[in-house]
């Protein structure tokens, strides 16, 4: 059964490295594996990731030795299930502003008794070619990473309740949407946004928990390409 590379690294006190994709590309997923990354992150909130594409992308990720993560477009259980059934092993839920939303996110990602995930026979569950007994359920539950994205002013007001929910493994920021929720649209580096993020991090640490960026370091694939191209052009034009 699949093992989550990020969880393995976390248990060893190490950081996991990966790449972010805002568009589908099985070739880039394969190259990330060859480069030595441990995970790939699909932005299913903003990117065009359909279930059939995710099936293929997760298949390539498995073959390349990468653990597939995804940000889901919403935290409805049916939405999250479609990602998990493809083989996604890490789920980031956007706009977690209340304890109730955090609970909904956590419950949707794991089987009973730790959650309410439905069992399906897609590739995420080995096409049903495995006994859906306690061993499978426990192993799968233990290898899912659940991330709550705290990207709204309301999140800080309800932070104690959010942090009290069992089943959320990591917490993530989102400066662009934080700025918008403060009426500072387009200003993710505004001092008030930075202050908000610092307060959230302090609360997370006070609860004995971690931010995603403390255990998962990733590069945007688009930026890797653009930065590489610009460096090449600069070197050529300067020669």
Image (tube, helix red, strand yellow):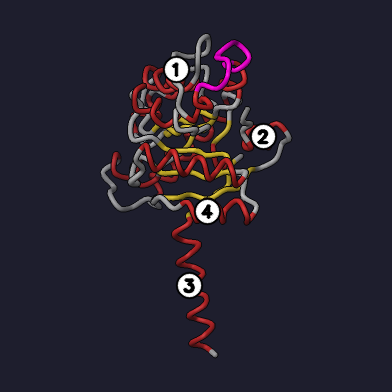
Counting residues from the N terminus, which is met first, the one under dot 1 or under dot 4? 1
Taking depth in this image into account, of 39 and 11 the one nearest to the observer is: 39
Q: Quadrant of the N terminus?
A: top right
- The x, y position of residue 81, in whole percent, is 40, 25
Secondary structure at badge 1 equals: loop
Asked if labels 1 and 3 touch by Cβ distance under 8 angstroms, the answer is no
Residue at x 55% of width, y 22% of height: 129
Counting residues from the N terminus, which is met first, the one under dot 3 or under dot 1? 1
- The x, y position of residue 156, in whole percent, is 40, 29
Crowding near pointer 2: few (<14 within 10 Å), some, many (20+)?
A: some
| View extreme (right): residue | 12
Identify the residue under disc 3: 229
Q: Nearer the viewer, mark 3 or mark 1?
A: 1
Identify the residue under disc 4: 219
Counting residues from the N terminus, which is met first, the one under dot 2 or under dot 3? 2
Membership of 160 in magenta stretch: no
Identify the residue under disc 1: 117
Identify the residue under disc 2: 10
Q: Nearer the viewer, mark 1 or mark 4?
A: 1
Asked if labels 2 and 4 touch by Cβ distance under 8 angstroms, the answer is no
Asked if labels 1 and 2 touch by Cβ distance under 8 angstroms, the answer is no
Q: Nearer the viewer, mark 2 or mark 3?
A: 3
Counting residues from the N terminus, which is met first, the one under dot 2 or under dot 1? 2
Residue at x 35% of width, y 32% of height: 95
| Residues drawn in magenta | 128-137
């Amino acid at each position: 059964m699949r093992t989550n590379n990020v969880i393995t690294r976390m248990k060893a006190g190490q950081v996991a490295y990966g790449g972010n994709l805002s568009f589908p590309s099985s070739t880039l997923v394969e190259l990330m594996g060859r480069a030595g990354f441990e995970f790939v992150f699909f932005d299913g909130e903003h990117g065009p990731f359909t279930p059939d594409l995710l099936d293929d992308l997760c298949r390539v990720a498995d073959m390349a030795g990468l653990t597939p993560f995804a940000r889901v477009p919403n935290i409805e259980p049916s939405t999250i299930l479609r990602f998990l059934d493809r083989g996604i092993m890490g789920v980031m839920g956007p706009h977690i502003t209340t304890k109730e939303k955090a609970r909904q996110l956590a419950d949707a990602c794991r089987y009973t008794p730790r959650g309410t995930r439905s069992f399906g026979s897609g590739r995420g569950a080995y096409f049903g070619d495995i006994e859906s007994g306690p061993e499978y359920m426990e192993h799968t539950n233990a290898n899912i990473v659940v991330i709550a994205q705290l990207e709204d002013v309301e999140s800080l007001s309800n932070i104690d309740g959010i942090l009290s929910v069992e089943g959320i493994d990591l917490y993530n920021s989102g400066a662009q949407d934080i700025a918008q929720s403060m009426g500072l649209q387009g200003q993710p580096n505004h001092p008030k946004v930075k202050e908000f993020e610092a307060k959230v991090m302090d609360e997370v640490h006070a609860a004995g928990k971690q931010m995603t960026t403390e255990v998962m370091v990733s590069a945007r694939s688009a930026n890797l390409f653009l930065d590489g191209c610009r460096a090449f052009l600069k070197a050529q034009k300067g020669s």
